[in-house]
Amino acid sequence: MPPSNKAIARKKLVIFYVLDTSGSMVDEGKIGALNEAMRETVTVLQEIASKNADAEMQVAVMEFSSGARWITDAPTFLEDFYWDDLTAGGLTDIGDALHELRTKMSRSTFLQSDTGYMVPIIIFMSDGYPTDSWEKELQKITDEKTGNRWFKYSTKIALALGNDADVNMLSKIVGTKEAVIQTNDLEDFKKMIKVVSVTSSLLNSVSQPTGGAVTSGVDIVKKVTGEESDPIPDPEPIPDPEPTEGSDEIPDKW
């Protein structure tokens, strides 16, 4: 039988960026460093996406200050994405950002696809302390019965920029302090955004289609900071069954 010319359908992998653009980001050129880092990161990810045979890569970007706002109306294919510089001002309403994630990370909204979605990557970044009821929103999104299962099983990493960043808050959001990278150096910060994005996208796009488990944020941080020189061990497999039609439950095989 002659080989088929039909392309193999690939699942989609989304990197969610949840970025602090509060007023304190104006200080010391932090907002400029963020914009520069994201421009460089997008360029590298676009190259990776063009050669990725395992997943169709997308990005979704949200900023939070006085409230939260999606920069992308929906997950956008990397080849179609252009970074438009953000400006800083306002408060640090990360609770609003968690609310947006809870409502949009769903098969009825952002994660609609005939071929399906892999468990996403979420990269948080903040330089300050929250100014809203973030703990209430965190409880909602992580609730065992009514929470968002995409969020629960996602690869979550946080970048804490500067001494005023609330590492404790970010640790609770991503699940552990070991998945938080803190730096006071802008050049190191720019490097970390790019390296975390590339490493997590490469590892997750390869492991999930072959039935492997999702790489944790802790393993990503260990890898990019040099704490883990050996190959990343397989995490515990996700035990949930295949979802029913219209369900937002996460299957145990990708």
Image: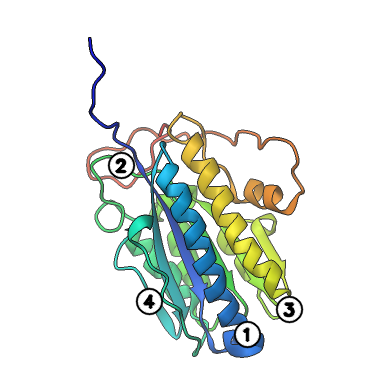
Tell which circle, 2 or 3, labels the residue nearer the N-terminal end: 2
The Cα–Cα distance between marks 4 and 2, rounded to whole angstroms, is 25 Å
Q: Name the residue under label 2.
A: 116
For the residues bearing labels 2 and 1, Cβ distance under 8 angstroms? no
The Cα–Cα distance between marks 3 and 1, rounded to whole angstroms, is 15 Å
Local crowd at mark 3 within 10 Å, few (<14), some, or many (≥20)? few
For the residues bearing labels 4 and 2, Cβ distance under 8 angstroms? no
Tell which circle, 4 or 3, labels the residue nearer the N-terminal end: 4
**Is 211 located above or below residue 144 in the figure?**
above
Q: Tell me, for residue 163, which label it has, or none.
A: 3
Tell which circle, 2 or 1, labels the residue nearer the N-terminal end: 1
Q: Which residue type does callout 3 highlight?
A: Asn
Image point (68%, 74%), residue name: 186
- Which residue is at the front of the view, 231 or 233? 231
The Cα–Cα distance between marks 4 and 1, rounded to whole angstroms, is 22 Å
Tell which circle, 4 or 2, labels the residue nearer the N-terminal end: 4
Q: Judge from the rendering whether residue 188 lies leftward or rightward of residue 113; answer left or right.
A: right
**Is 56 located above or below residue 17 in the figure?**
above
Q: Mark 1 points at which residue?
A: 29
Residue 16 placed where, x, y %? 44, 60
Q: Which residue type does callout 1 highlight?
A: Gly
Q: Mark 4 points at which residue?
A: 69
Q: Judge from the rendering whether residue 7 lies leftward or rightward of residue 119; answer left or right.
A: left
Tell which circle, 3 or 1, labels the residue nearer the N-terminal end: 1
- Which residue is at the front of the view, 224 or 110? 224
Classify the position of the C terminus by image quarter.
top left
Q: Nearer the viewer, mark 3 or mark 1?
A: 1
Local crowd at mark 2 within 10 Å, few (<14), some, or many (≥20)? some
Residue 80 placed where, x, y %? 32, 60
Q: Is mark 2 on a helix, strand or loop?
A: loop
Classify the position of the N terminus by image quarter.
top left
Residue 246 placed where, x, y %? 23, 45
